[in-house]
């Protein structure tokens, strides 16, 4: 079936690639815990969304390399 580590890496990478805004927003909401801002008021910066997508693509590539190599 394949290396389970490679499958997990690909799945997490796909999440970051397909839904970068939602993932970046979730991360910002987790960072806002303890602050006075409401969860609904938190928005990720554009660079954060772009970085989330780039990291997702890199994770997919690494995951496929692990699957092919393992």
Image (spheres, helix red, strand yellow):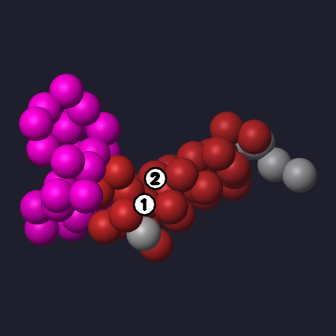
Image check: 1 left or right of 63?
right
Image check: 20 left or right of 59?
left
Q: Which residues are magenta?
A: 27-54
Cα distance, mark 2 to mark 1?
Answer: 9 Å
Whether residue 8 is visible: yes
The numbered mark at residue 59 is: 2
| Nearer-the-camera pick, 47 or 68 | 47
Q: Is residue 17 magenta?
A: no
Q: Is residue 47 magenta?
A: yes
Work out which residue is located at the far top of the displayed protein and give it: 34
Image check: 66 left or right of 2?
left
In the image, what residue occupies the spot 20% across and 48% down? 38
In the image, what residue occupies the spot 30% across and 38% down? 30
Q: Please name the residue that numbered disc 1 is placed on.
A: 16
In the image, what residue occupies the spot 35% across and 51% down? 26
Whether residue 65 is visible: no
Q: Position of residue 13 (x, y in %)?
A: 49, 56
Secondary structure of residue under mark 1: helix
Q: Quadrant of residue 21?
A: bottom left
| Nearer-the-camera pick, 46 or 70 | 46
Q: Quadrant of residue 36?
A: top left
The mark lying in front, picked from 2 and 1, is: 1
Q: Main secondary structure of the magenta part?
A: helix
Secondary structure of residue under mark 2: helix
Residue count near mark 2 (Cα–Cα under 10 Å), binned few <14, some 14–19, many ≥20: many
The quadrant the C terminus occupies is: top right
In the image, what residue occupies the spot 64% across and 45% down? 8
Mark 2–mark 1 contact, CB under 8 Å?
yes
Image check: 7 left or right of 22?
right
């Amino acid at each position: 079936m394949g290396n389970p580590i490679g499958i997990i890496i690909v799945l997490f990478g796909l999440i970051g690639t397909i839904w970068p805004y939602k993932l970046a927003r979730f991360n910002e909401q987790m960072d806002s815990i303890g602050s006075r801002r409401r969860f609904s008021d938190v928005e990720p910066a554009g660079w954060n969304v772009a970085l989330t997508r780039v990291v997702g693509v890199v994770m997919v590539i690494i995951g496929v390399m692990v699957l092919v190599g393992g």
